[in-house]
Amino acid sequence: MSGHNLHPSVQKFKAFVKQHPHIKDHLRKNHGLIQSYYEKWMILGEDDPFWDTLPDVKNEGKMSKKEWMKQFGVLLQEIDWEDVSKHIDDLNGAIGQIQQIISNVQQDKQERRPPVEYPYY
């Protein structure tokens, strides 16, 4: 949505957020805060000490590729592959039964269809 379609107070709030990166980080991490921060901004204003008391957002969720691969490897080691194989076999059986039902229904339709008779033989 372009800025010219927004209410002027919303445009001012957007400018305020752009000027304060730590607030921007909070809003990116938790989108649910946008409404409450907007309301606080409307009531308290830009110069209120509340905006300075917000803690810095840490990049806890970001992992390096090496850490991610290590964690992924640990998860793969914890998988019970025999259990996975049993589930796959069960799914194959269920799919086979569904295919059998579909073919039975198609055969029933073929058998119920009256033969086409051509009057000019």
Image (spheres, rainbow, N blue to C red):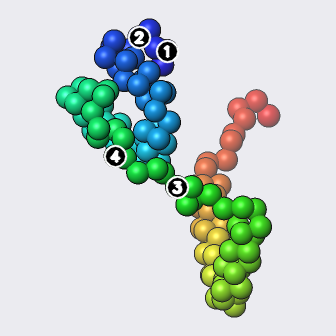
Q: Residue 32: tell me if it is visible.
A: no
Mark 4 against mark 3, which lies toward the viewer? 4
Label 3, label 2: how far apart the Cα atoms are: 33 Å
Q: Looking at the picture, which amino acid does disc 1 mark? A: Ser
Q: Residues within 10 Å of mark 3 (few under 14, many from 20)?
A: few
Q: Which label belongs to residue 5?
A: 2
Q: Which label belongs to residue 2?
A: 1
Residue contact at pointers 4 and 3, CB within 8 angstroms = no
Mark 1 against mark 3, which lies toward the viewer? 3
Mark 1 against mark 4, which lies toward the viewer? 4
Q: Looking at the picture, which amino acid does disc 2 mark? A: Asn
Q: Element type at marker 4?
A: helix
Label 1, label 3: how far apart the Cα atoms are: 30 Å
Name the residue located 55 percent from the left edge and 60 percent from the top edge. 60
Q: Quadrant of residue 69?
A: bottom right
Q: Which residue is mark 3?
A: 58
